[in-house]
Image: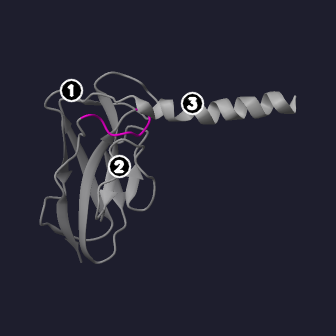
Amino acid sequence: MKFAKAMMATAVLAFTPLLWAGETPAPEGAKAYIISPADGATVTSPVTVQFGLSGIGVAPAGTEKEKTGHHHLLIDVKELPDMNSPIPSDEHHRHFGGGQTEVTVELAPGQHTLQLLLGDHHHVPHNPPVLSEPVTITVN
């Protein structure tokens, strides 16, 4: 029994990378963009960020449906995540696996950058990545 469980655990660990090995193609011309706030805007916290997409649809994480993905909001990210791995989940990489298209976030006073990155059903960016232009805002 112990041997069988150990073999199963080993098999799961050995084949888990295969779950991420495939690339989800992005439809030609697919774009992500931030509807609001506008680049250069001065705002107060909390800040409502509205997400936009063109040429691709939204589906919750875990839903494997062609030409869809779900949003990830990158906040004050200095370096983009690895485009061949699941997008991290932390205070700088916010996941919207429910298919949400806007969020209200608390941001400290000062300058901040916001950027959207679409993830597939496994939170891995599409190929090519569907990534918005960064938006820089100032929070009073």
Name the element at disc 3.
Answer: helix
The amino acid pointed to by label 3 is Phe
Q: CA distance from mark 2 to mark 3?
A: 20 Å
Most extreme residue toward the right is: 1
Q: Quadrant of the C terminus?
A: bottom left
Mark number displayed over residue 82: 2
In the figure, residue 67 lies in which quadrant? top left
Which residue position is annotated with label 3? 15
Q: Camera-side residue: 30 or 44?
A: 30
Q: Are marks 1 and 3 in contact (CB under 8 Å)?
A: no
Please report the residue visible at 24 percent of the width from the left and 54 percent of the height from the top.
115
Task: List x then y, in percent, for residue 48.
Answer: 29, 57
Q: Earlier in the sequence, mark 1 or mark 2?
A: 1
Most extreme residue toward the top is: 66
Q: Are marks 2 and 3 in contact (CB under 8 Å)?
A: no
Q: Camera-side residue: 83 or 35?
A: 83
